[in-house]
Image: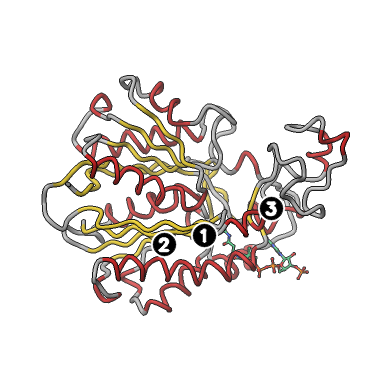
Amino acid sequence: MPNARIAGIGMYVPEQVVTNFDLEKYMETSDAWIQERTGIKERRYAKRTGETTTTMGVEAAKLAIKNAGITADEIDFIIFATLSPDYYFPGCGVLVQRAMKMKEIGALDVRNQCSGFVYALSVGDQYIRSGMYKNILVIGSDKHSFGLDFSTRGRNVSVIFGDGAGAVVLQPTEKEGQGILSTHLHCDGNSAEILAMYNPGTHANYWVDEKLADFDDAEIGQMFMSHAMVDKAQNFPFMDGPSVFKKAIVKIPEAVMEALDANKLATTDIDMLIPHQANLRISQFVQQQLGLPDSHVYNNIQRYGNTTAASIPIALYEAWAEGKIKENDIVCLASFGSGFTWGSALIRW
Ligand code: ACO
């Protein structure tokens, strides 16, 4: 069974830079608060029209395909991770197939939020190992700017997120011990409502604590998109930030150690850790717990904010493009996010 290797990688971020000072114009916040709590200085926002989760994914995919030295015609499967799809349905994968004029191949959307890219990579890895596909396009892309509450009410969430996309092409490698060595995926659905966007949805208050989503019977009749939903800010993401923080700093190191143990490696073998860019303080905690030097951890949340499914492939691309990842290096990807979901992927580059 061949391992999958990352044969090409690409990224795309929109041109528009939005600084913390820009956000001060919309809500009661400050550059100092945002930098101290999250490390973020600026993020990118997509154009309001003409730039979608899919179009950003397509731009990242074009670069990944070019870097793999193949053409879009040679891709035989698409996996698209996002929490902000262009449509409620169908998914973004089919829109990529259309936009890139690909053959009538399969396309799968993955809904695992900040862990979406690691989950998508794991799915692609299994298809390559089984011999089913030879050139898989894996994309992580999110356009948050369209769905954030820019009033003071939503400031704990909206200052964190940014838009962008990353992509890789997976191919089989016959080289022993190279490529994706293992992936490890987890979830704890008990925490589903701690970091979530409840509407539009079909729950009709069933799972959701009344104080979070209190709709009466009359209102429930008009769900998917009602005025009451908008009045109660239920069309925006909800996050209990401190709970997310506490769990993330435990689960990310666990996922890294699980990957190392499965491959009989130690933290000293890691050449580059790419943690999901949730919050610089989370990355710093993880780095400290694993005892890694600064040169072995890549962070770019300062410039892009948290781009959820795109954060790991964007950081991976930049680390690679800056020459910080070389052949044979051990690279560990580690994620944590809504669900809760978390996981890791260990790669010999
Ligand atoms: N600007 C100014 N003040 C703010 C802002 C803001 N943007 N947001 C919240 N505050 C205020 C709150 O209203 C609160 O004020 P109060 O004490 O008067 O009530 C105070 O700051 C503290 O609020 P907390 O939510 O407790 O702030 P905390 O110090 O925990 O920081 C944060 C919030 C940054 C979200 C933090 O909880 C965190 O980093 N959590 C991890 C979550 C995360 O990283 N999520 C990313 C997405 S999920 C993922 O990718 C895994």
Check disc 3 and give the amino acid type. Phe
- Where does the image place residue 348, in percent across and percent down from the top left? 21, 59
Q: Is mark 2 within 8 Å of ligand 1?
A: no
Residue for point 41% across, 28% down: 96
Q: Is mark 1 within 8 Å of ligand 1?
A: yes
Q: Quadrant of ligand 1?
A: bottom right
Between 121 and 293, the one lying in front of the other is 121
Check disc 2 and give the amino acid type. Pro
Check disc 1 and give the amino acid type. Ala
Asked which secondary structure carries label 2, the reply is: strand
The residue pinned by badge 3 equals 238
Disc 2 to disc 3, C-alpha distance:
22 Å
Which of the two labelled residues, at mark 2 and mark 3, occupies the earlier sequence position? 3
User: To which quarter of the image does residue 204 belong?
Assistant: top right
Tell me the quadrant of the picture where the C terminus can be found.
bottom left
**Residue ranking furthest to the left:** 175
In the rendered image, the vertical position of residue 238 relative to residue 227, given as above or below: below
Tag nearer the camera, 3 or 1: 3
Q: Which mark is residue 275?
A: 2
Disc 2 to disc 1, C-alpha distance:
8 Å
Asked which secondary structure carries label 3, the reply is: strand
Mark 2 closeness class: few <14, some 14–19, many ≥20 residues within 10 Å: many
Disc 3 to disc 1, C-alpha distance:
15 Å
**Mark 3 and mark 2 in contact (Cβ < 8 Å)?**
no
Residue for point 53% across, 63% down: 279
**Mark 1 and mark 2 in contact (Cβ < 8 Å)?**
yes
Q: In the displayed structure, does residue 253 sit left or right of residue 1?
A: right
The residue pinned by badge 1 equals 278
- Where does the image place residue 183, in percent across and percent down from the top left? 33, 56
User: To which quarter of the image does residue 177 belong?
Assistant: bottom left
